[in-house]
Image (tube, coloured by chain):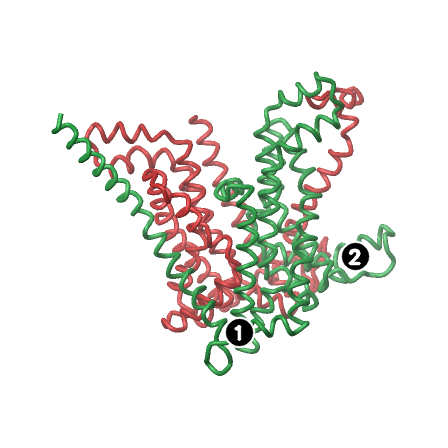
Amino acid sequence: MQAIRANETGLRVDEKLERLKLYGLSSPALLLILVILVIPVGWLFYVSFIGGDGQFSLENYQRMIKRSSYMRIFRTTFEVSVVTTALCIVIGYPLAYFLSQLPARLANLCMITVLLPFWTSLLVRTYAWLVLLQKKGLVNDWAIALGLWDEPIKMVHNMTGTLIGMVHIMLPFLILPVYGSMKAIDRDYMKAASNLGASPKRAFWDVFFPLTLPGLFAGTLMVFILCLGFFVTPAVLGGGKVIMVSMKIVSNIELFVSWGAASALGVVLLAMTFAILWVASRFLKLDQIAGGGH
Amino acid sequence: MFNWLNQPATETQITHGQRLWLYIVAVVIMLLLVAPTLIVVPMSFSDSQYLEFPPKVWSLRWYEHYFGSSEWMLATWTSLKAAFLTMLVATPVGVLAAYGLHASNVRFVRVTFLFLITPMMVPLVLVAIGVFYVYVQLGILYTVGGLVLAHSILALPLVVIVIGSALKSYDMSQENAARSLGAPRWKAFLTITLPQIRFAVVTAALLAFLTSFDEVVVAMFISGGDNPTLTRNMFNALRDQIDPTIASISTIMICVTTFMMILAQLFGQQKKAQD
């Protein structure tokens, strides 16, 4: 009896060791992220608290609050992110619904229209919009030919162009998780609702829509977070008129070599991102969001 | 045709006719999703300095300009090298991590997983300037090796997610069976598990390649000198003016992406056929 019990403890210790060994397989990945991500970002955090005289100071943060230009940048970032996310929901949800109702073969075919932009370089897509929306571009040409407007409209190097480009780039990030949650819904629920006398509208809003909310939340969160830190599209399509936080960070480094100011902005941006994720994690499991995106 | 309109479309007996608006809206959105990118392809064959659609005179002028420019060729070569090496680094490291987490099942697996996907959450600009500073200190700024390391952490979350979800639907008892028959764990993994998740591994590798190949912001800061990436040069060119050469490069990049997508699809089909 004694021997068996001792053996059991031994086995348990062995198993624990084995599990830790297996866990150790993730150490190269952990090390890589530690060295290339955590240390550099930690260093930025440190620099953000160093003032012009090399001493500890809060001046980099104080400047942000005092100067209205910084406040304006944060407001722009927020506005662009909110509007882009809202447009993505309004455009993406119906398309995801449409795709989820198609027979499998047709759905796979139509899905290419979502996956192709998802895989295509965002620089290429931004460039495409730059070409299409310019004054002598295709959109203006066609709109004038169709009589929609008489004079070429300025649609790029401003807020309009930025929003068009960003919505186009973010849409797949919303559609994919929403589509996933729609496909997971048992169609019998809708049949049951309708058998119980619900009108198609009522069955959709009371049964179908609530079941898609987890996917919708996940997609919304993903799009919003990506928008907050976005750089390429507003930098190219905004033409200097739409300045987002990430662009200010870059110009602080490239033009003014001002690491303190850039780091402080970065820390605030990161804090905002993590705060949103933290709030979201109270309602959703974050690792599932990551799984839902692909 | 009109008959079809009156047929029920869903379980709630709503007819196709009543939902016609949805179909129209959906087709328009799908067009808007793909058309802007694809329209660049014919435009790149235009002879004009201003990009036209449809081109009045067709020519390969911008392709000649691209292939004839040593600067663009150098950038393309750097990007290909970096993407290939990123794939070689991120895929095995990510597969190991995903497998380790899946099999170990210790208490802090979830936290570790979240840590592994943080590179997806941290704004790219922050990664870029942080890494830029550290690389200056280490003296590896503008090297392919440095670029590969930075791109690898950006690709890691994708690899971990793709492999992780493949392992979730894989039955680990197969590996346990092999081990109970005397195979060491590494052998059981290589001969039993790995072949069964190979489609996920290929997808993950392709994603890692594209992550590096398409990445702009980090490359903008830490590539340059003798090793500028294609995206870095493209971005700089875009800031100045609309250079038609970019249209030809974009076309080539779209072809590369489409090719990779087809590859991934083919592997996916094979998997379905096997199931």
Report which quarter residue B141 is drawn in.
bottom left
Give the chain of mark 1: A
Total marks placed: 2
The picture's colour for chain B is red
Quick one: label 1, few (<14), some, or many (20+) residues within 10 Å?
some
Q: Report which residue position mark 2 lands on.
A: A140
Closest to the observer, B234 or A180 = A180
Q: Is the residue B7 above or below the residue B173 in the image?
A: above
Marks 1/2: CA distance?
49 Å
Chain ID of residue with mark 2: A
- Percent position (x, y) of residue B167? 39, 36
**Residue for point 51% across, 63% down:** B126
Amino acid type, label 2: Asn
Check disc 1 and report the residue beneath it: A58
Residue B158, given in percent of the width and then of the height, sits at: 46, 47
x and y, in percent, of residue A181 in the image: 58, 34
Chain coloured green in the rendered structure = A
Quadrant assignment for the N terminus of chain B: top right
In the image, residue A24 sits, relative to residue A188, either above or below, namely below
